[in-house]
Image (spheres, helix red, strand yellow):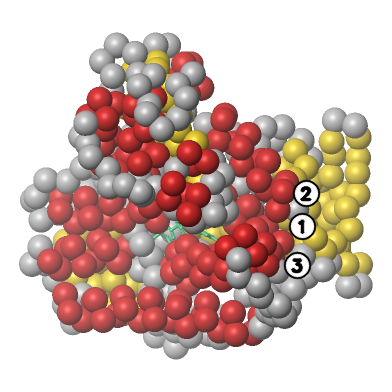
Amino acid sequence: MNEQYDVIVIGGGPGGYPAAIRAAQNGLKVACVDEWRNRDGGHAFGGTCLNAGCIPSKALLESTELLHRARHEFAAHGIGVSGVAVDLAAMQKRRATIVKTMTGGILALFKASGVVPVEGHGRLLAGNQVEVTGFDGSKRTLLAKDVILASGSTPLRLPNVPHDGRRIVDSWDALEFDSVPKRLGIIGAGVIGLELGSVWRRLGSEVTMLEALDRFLPMADGAVSKEAQRHFKKLGLDIQLGAKVARATVAGDRVEVVYTTAAGERTLEVDVLVVAVGRRPFTEGLLAPDAGVTQDERGFIRVDEHCRTAVPRVWAVGDVVRGPMLAHKGKEEGIMVADLIAGRYGEVNYRVIPSVIYTAPEIAWVGQTEEQAKAGGRSIKVGQFPFAASGRARAMESPAGFAKIVAAADDDEILGVHIIGPMAGELIAEAVLAMEYSASAEDLQRTIHAHPTLSEALHEAALAVDKRAIDSINR
Ligand code: FAD
Ligand code: AMP
């Protein structure tokens, strides 16, 4: 007899596993099917984010930032250190242990909430049936009233840049290097490229980044991207803009990269080349031909604003559907769908999704940039506060960067918040909450912020919107 569930989730990443847990919290009988295989062949829930993305990258960013601070900032505190040494094996072991703990945690959460974990490949058949192929090749069919597709994404490859996992690698490989490449090339100066570049630069690699676009971090506010570029240069990242990679070849123990610039063709020689040019939706073997789910020209599963596919009671969430490829976006979609299935209210506010780049200084934003707000024809006011004027940032020896608020000139509503500086990724949460409640700059002005904290930068930026900042000169 076929196993019958209320909800089957295909994919156990940050889109799928929260959907499964919320559906179980809603009293439904739930299975979560996942086929992730780690490099050692073992299975773990958590998808790209926990196994090969958000979590391992943050572990290495933290370790290498500490190293950087020990080498470059401790002296300013009057702390002399000598013989600072890196044990890369220990650093990588810590990264792997964090990943193992976090992915193991999902199984514990499943157990506590009653979600049935199923290891193997899931394939949607017609009639809301899911065929599961186990790692041993065995097949069984599960039935569900509702199916949630959360199969995620996979790194984009470039034609003529053949991945071999050793000399030409992707972001996952680059998180698991067991030695520091002397010369590291990175194609793509996006979020992932910059985070990986920072890690290996701090560990001693000479890092060259080739970016096809002429503008640095085009999705960020112009003032933020300008400030960020200055700091990455100071760190020693050689970021070449307007450099479009045409091909790369491995010759012995080095890689030759050919790219075009406005001035003509150029060649770069590196020891290892990371391809970090973005990700594509992953749907290999996911949909039987008669399953009825449709995809757009780029392979994303087509959904409406509530993540409904073309097939009744089949839903899709996370990186496999339109929108930013971010773990928290997938999580909110998964929770929304699980609530809608249970007949509850569910909604995702796509206008208020924060973005964070976990470099030093950290970069975070939510809502519209100054350029976007202006292009939208809205009359705006802008307030900015430098961390150099923050007592807490000074005490932390982290005075770089600023917080910036873009507000509507007419009704004072906050349209966007942009932070580059210490703990920006944490600070942005207040801005997200403010925007979720359609707060005005004045609402933030009248909210008491503890002193001395980094969060005062947001308070002061809100005051600066009306040229009423206290702790910095109003311009
Ligand atoms: P995934 O996490 O890709 O999970 C999909 C799961 O489904 C996988 O386990 C896959 O094996 C499984 N699967 C696929 N098809 C099937 C099938 N047919 N049957 C069974 N199982 C299947 N985002 C952030 O928000 N913050 C960050 O700091 C961040 N850092 C990142 C760093 C790196 C290096 C990378 C690569 C990504 C990072 N991301 C970050 C992006 C984030 O990882 C993704 O947005 C997120 O993982 C998407 O979640 P998902 O559940 O949609 O897909
Ligand atoms: P992201 O989508 O944030 O991961 O960033 C990927 C970056 O890679 C984008 O900024 C792209 O412009 C860049 N990119 C894509 N293809 C190439 C290429 N062939 N050469 C150089 N950069 C590229």
Please rate how many residues cluster around mark 1, counting C-alpha atoms within 10 Å: few if below 14, some from 14 to 19, many from 20.
Answer: many
- Residue at 34 percent across and 59 percent down: it is 15
| Residue 99 % position (x, y) | 45, 76
Do the numbered discs 1 and 2 sit on residues whose CB atoms are within 8 Å? Answer: yes
- Residue at 49 percent across and 18 percent down: it is 475
In this figure, which residue is indicated by the disc labeled 3?
A: 204
- The residue type indicated by label 1 comes to Val
Q: Is mark 1 within 8 Å of ligand 2?
A: no
Looking at the rendered structure, the secondary structure element under dot 2 is: strand
- Residue at 29 percent across and 26 percent down: it is 441
- The residue type indicated by label 2 comes to Asp
Nearer to me, 439 or 124? 439
Looking at the rendered structure, the secondary structure element under dot 1 is: strand
In this figure, which residue is indicated by the disc labeled 1?
A: 207
Nearer to me, 305 or 350? 350
Q: Nearer the viewer, mark 1 or mark 3?
A: 3
Q: Is residue 77 visible?
A: yes
Going by the picture, which residue comes out furthest to the front? 78
In this figure, which residue is indicated by the disc labeled 2?
A: 238
**Mark 1 to mark 3 CA distance (whole Å):** 9 Å
